[in-house]
């Protein structure tokens, strides 16, 4: 995960402005799965690969203690500001999902938002199981890309994704990640959890053309490609800019689908 963190160095603020926030109901769901009544505070929550704190802040007022583990100093700086603005006292730590430095049976809830594909699952999943108390919950969640906005925008974004991923592979700069659609199976096959399930949730926000392009540019692999001098036309980014400018000249509603994989220790 240390290598992955380097891809996100230098643009933490841009990342923070572009990325969507988790569904507001997510802490309630995870609290219930961890055995807590509605409105009851979860004693300890750990957010792995916490980034800029987007996935940490929702626990303000909902947890007794929050620990955010993030290997990027740039990301931690933004997370500190974000959590302070939200009134959340957070223990921000330099660490990785594979080596958190936390005690055994420490956490009631462990989360990984838009991050599990950067982890080494053979090392990270046993670390999560070690840190969770019996009956605690691990939630690995990701949103589907792109958000549902407009048919023409959707087609242009998916074409961009295909081209960009193909160029990553061709140049050998594709991150050493695992496919997001395999997370559920890896969690089940690990044998570390007594129950594993998946829930779909949604988040509504809005954005214009500039934000859509910023979302595209918030991906670490794409930043690496552009730094190598890849032409935007080659990866379909130029076309995405053009379509977004026509279709999203003013902010429009966006719908994000979140896939939440739940594992009970």
Image: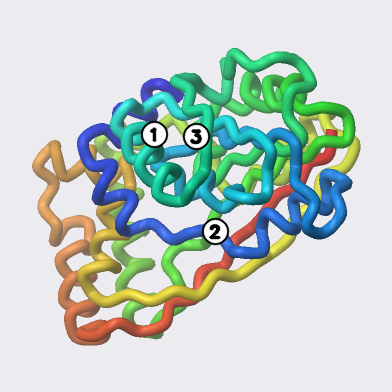
197 versus 212 height, above or below: above
The one nearer the camera, 102 or 200, is 102
Residue 22's mark?
2
Decide if residue 239 is in sight here: yes
Residues marked 1 and 3 touching at CB (< 8 Å) = no
Q: Secondary structure at mark 3?
A: loop
Q: Secondary structure at mark 1?
A: loop
Picture coordinates of residue 83 (x, y %)? Answer: 45, 44
Q: CA distance from mark 2 to mark 3?
A: 14 Å
The one nearer the camera, 253 or 38, is 38
Residue 49's mark?
3
- Name the residue tied to disc 1: 175
Residue 194 found in image quarter: top right
Decide if residue 173 is in sight here: no
Q: Quadrant of the C terminus?
A: top right
Label 2 Cα crowd, 10 Å radius (few <14 / some 14-19 / many 20+): many
- The reply, left or right, for residue 161 in relation to residue 183 is left
Which residue sits at x=45%, y=29%? 70
The tag earlier along the polypeptide, 2 or 3, is 2
The tag earlier along the polypeptide, 2 or 1, is 2
- The reply, left or right, for residue 247 in relation to residue 189 is left
13 versus 207 height, above or below: above
Label 1 Cα crowd, 10 Å radius (few <14 / some 14-19 / many 20+): some
Q: CA distance from mark 1 to mark 3?
A: 15 Å
Q: How many marks?
A: 3
Picture coordinates of residue 28 (x, y %)? Answer: 73, 58
């Amino acid at each position: 995960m240390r290598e992955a963190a380097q891809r996100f160095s230098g643009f933490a603020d841009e990342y923070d402005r572009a990325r969507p926030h988790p569904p507001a109901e997510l802490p309630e769901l995870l609290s219930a799965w961890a055995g807590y009544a509605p409105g009851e505070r979860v004693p300890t929550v750990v957010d792995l690969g916490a980034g800029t704190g987007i996935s940490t802040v929702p626990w303000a007022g909902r947890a007794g203690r929050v620990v955010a583990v993030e290997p990027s100093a740039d990301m931690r700086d933004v997370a500190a500001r974000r959590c302070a603005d939200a009134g959340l006292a957070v223990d921000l730590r330099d660490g990785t999902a594979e080596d958190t430095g936390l005690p055994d049976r420490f956490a009631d809830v462990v989360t990984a938002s838009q991050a599990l594909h950067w982890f080494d699952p053979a090392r990270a999943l046993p670390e999560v199981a070690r840190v969770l108390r019996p009956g605690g919950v691990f939630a690995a969640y990701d949103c589907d890309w792109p958000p549902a906005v407009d048919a023409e925008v959707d087609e242009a974004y998916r074409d961009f994704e295909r081209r960009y991923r193909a160029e990553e592979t061709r140049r050998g700069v594709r991150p050493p990640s695992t496919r997001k659609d395999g997370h559920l199976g890896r969690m089940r096959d690990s044998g570390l959890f007594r129950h594993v399930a998946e829930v779909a949730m949604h988040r509504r926000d809005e954005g214009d053309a500039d934000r859509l392009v910023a979302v595209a540019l918030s991906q670490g692999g794409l930043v690496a490609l552009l730094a190598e001098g890849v032409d935007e036309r080659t990866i379909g980014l130029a076309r995405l800019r053009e379509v977004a400018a026509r279709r999203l000249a003013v902010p429009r509603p966006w719908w994000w689908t979140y896939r939440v994989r739940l594992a009970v220790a």
